[in-house]
């Protein structure tokens, strides 16, 4: 792992820190005689101190003060490989609907409209909330036995 190099910082520098309100702050003081020599003040006047390597606490595994903002790019949830026309449950708020799968695109699950299948329509709608429908024989209502 690359070492966090803050050796050239000086009073007045703008740095980004995980513990600073909204991330950004200004170096207000550097005192090499103390364990936490870097004194930062965020844009709201809150003070936070750091080690010379940018650690907030002695037992931190990673530094939390940097020259620039740390941006985390979260990966998209992997989507399952589903056959076209797989049974799906889709919903908006509390309204759930039974649909047949068409495809995934841009984080949405597209299903054929109104319960139709690929054999009977080319119309589909994208859904943010979905799950693969799983038949549960214990919950199946059999008209012949009642």
Image (cartoon, rainbow, N blue to C red):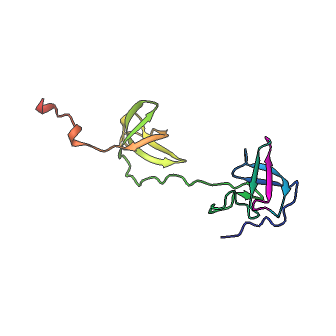
Q: Residue furthest front?
A: 33
At 31% from the left and 45% from the top, the residue drawn is 134
To which quarter of the image does residue 60 belong? bottom right
Tell me where residue 71 appears, x and y as whole percent.
67, 54
- The N terminus appears in which quarter of the rendering? bottom right
Q: From the viewer's perspective, is 9 left or right of 110?
A: right
Placement of 34 over or under 93, stated as above or below: below
Quadrant holding the C terminus: top left
In the rendered view, would you say 126 is above or below 143?
below
**Nearer the observer, 144 or 19:** 19
Magenta residues (range): 34-44
Q: Quadrant of residue 2?
A: bottom right
Q: What x and y, as percent, mark residue 94?
A: 43, 30
> 126 or 58, which lies in front?
58
Q: Position of residue 80 (x, y in %)?
A: 42, 53
Asked if the stretch drawn in magenta spans residue 116, the answer is no
* Quarter of the rendering containing residue 67: bottom right
Residue 103 percent across, percent down from the top left: 45, 48
Q: How many numbered marks, from 0 up?
A: 0
Residue at the left extreme, as displayed: 145
Q: Is residue 62 left or right of residue 137?
A: right
Looking at the picture, tell me which residue is in the foreground, 127 or 30. Answer: 30
């Amino acid at each position: 792992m690359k070492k966090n190099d803050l050796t050239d910082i000086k009073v007045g520098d703008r740095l980004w820190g995980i513990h600073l309100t909204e991330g950004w702050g200004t170096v207000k003081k550097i005192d090499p005689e103390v364990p936490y020599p870097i004194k930062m003040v965020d844009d709201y006047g809150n003070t936070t101190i750091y080690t010379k390597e940018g650690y907030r606490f002695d037992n931190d595994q990673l530094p939390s003060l940097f020259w620039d903002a740390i941006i985390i790019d979260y990966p998209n949830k992997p989507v399952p490989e589903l056959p076209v026309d797989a049974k799906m449950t889709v919903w908006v708020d509390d309204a759930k609907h039974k649909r047949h799968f068409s495809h995934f695109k841009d984080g949405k699950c597209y299903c054929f409209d109104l319960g139709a299948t690929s054999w009977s329509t080319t119309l589909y709608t994208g859904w943010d909330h979905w799950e693969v429908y799983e038949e549960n024989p214990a919950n199946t209502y059999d008209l012949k036995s009642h």
